[in-house]
């Protein structure tokens, strides 16, 4: 489609205008931008570029093929496995499940390859009880059969699956421990982000100081809820953004992490079949440990 930007559209983001004109979602527009199917004045379009009256937009935001989860031979760290569940240590930089812009290389693809069989539940998110952001590393439990998926899903809703995270933040918290209680919803000024907003979904994060450094701190987080980007949003609102969080804070070229310095280090739940209490703990990856050492030496 060819379109000349009007005075009313001038100043708006490229992705916003293309979404309005095409009637497609922002996610599909982002996918089209990544493919090079959106051009402004003959050049590849950028999502956040403000448009100018008279700009010539060329775009094709076609509906993508259905997403399917397929098996891939990808090594992943297995922490525990039996006939009902598998607990993995997801690497930072790995997406949890397939999406329009990432149909391969995900944790689900790797799990299907590892198991050599299907997983229960949703076709795109099979076996998943919870998720981690792409750049958050750490522990995830995955159900291997329908009974385990049902039992663990109920446990998650009842807040009986306990998750603890470690994170490195810029600055020092005002108190050695505390609770952040702020409802989370889409950021009204940036649809790619979330924020504490009136009418958002309830979100509660408990934090505790693990170690203080001259200009940074390492905190332990315990979640009562599991909202998208919850820890990242709550810390940003406190003025203590996670180190290297490009979306809610700032990049830090001194660290080798692909994104925010956040690691899901402890996971506890009752086995879905036997009821046996299970507790797992994994240390953060080497890049996180290196960043921690850097801050300790400042």
Image: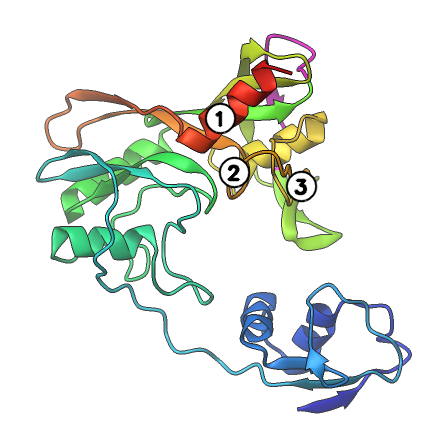
Which residue is painted at 10% across and 27% down in the image?
274
Residue on which disc 2 sits: 256
Pick the residue in front: 184 or 221.
221
Dot 3 or dot 1, earlier in sequence: 3
Q: Position of residue 228 (x, y in %)?
A: 52, 43
The magenta stretch is 172-183
Given contact means CB atoms under 8 Å apart, are the residues at marks 2 and 1 in contact?
Answer: yes
Q: Earlier in the sequence, mark 2 or mark 1?
A: 2
Marked residue nearer the N-terminal end (3 or 2)? 3
Is 2 left or right of 160, judged from the image as shown? right
- In the picture of the structure, the residue carrying the numbered disc 1 is 290
Q: Is residue 34 magenta?
A: no
Describe residue 263's horizontal placement relative to residue 277 as left or right: right
Q: Where is 8 relative to 131, above or below?
A: below
Which residue is denoted by mark 3 in the rendering? 195
State the quadrant of the C terminus: top right
Give the colour scheme of this rendering: rainbow
User: Could you tell me which residue is drawn at 70 percent across and 31 percent down?
Assistant: 237
Q: Examine the rendering and report whether any part of residue 45 can be seen.
A: yes
């Amino acid at each position: 489609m060819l379109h000349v930007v009007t005075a009313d559209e001038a100043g708006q983001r490229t992705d916003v205008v293309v979404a309005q004109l095409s009637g497609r979602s922002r996610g599909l527009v982002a996918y089209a931008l990544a493919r090079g199917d959106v051009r402004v004045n003959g050049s590849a379009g950028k999502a956040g570029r403000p448009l100018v009256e008279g700009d010539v937009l060329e775009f094709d935001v076609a509906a993508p093929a259905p997403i399917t989860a397929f098996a891939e031979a990808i090594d992943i760290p297995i922490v525990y496995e039996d006939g009902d569940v598998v607990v993995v240590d997801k690497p930072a930089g790995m997406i949890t499940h397939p999406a329009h812009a990432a149909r391969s290389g995900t944790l689900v693809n790797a799990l299907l390859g590892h198991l050599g069989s299907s997983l229960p539940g949703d076709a795109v998110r099979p076996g998943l009880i919870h998720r981690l952001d792409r750049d958050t590393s750490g522990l995830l439990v995955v159900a291997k059969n329908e009974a385990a998926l049902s039992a663990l899903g109920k446990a998650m809703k009842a807040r009986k699956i306990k998750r603890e995270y470690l994170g490195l933040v810029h600055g020092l918290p005002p108190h050695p421990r505390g609770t952040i209680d702020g409802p989370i919803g889409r950021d009204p000024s940036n649809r790619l982000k979330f924020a504490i907003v009136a009418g958002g979904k309830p979100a509660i994060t408990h934090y505790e100081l693990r170690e203080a450094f001259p200009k940074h701190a390492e905190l332990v987080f315990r979640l009562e809820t599991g909202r998208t980007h919850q820890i990242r949003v709550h810390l940003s609102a406190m003025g203590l953004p996670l180190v290297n969080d490009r979306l809610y804070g700032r990049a830090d070229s001194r660290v080798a992490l692909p994104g925010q310095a956040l690691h899901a280090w402890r996971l506890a739940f009752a086995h879905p079949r036997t009821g046996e209490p299970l507790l797992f703990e994994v240390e953060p990856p080497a890049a996180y440990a290196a960043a921690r050492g850097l801050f300790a030496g400042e």
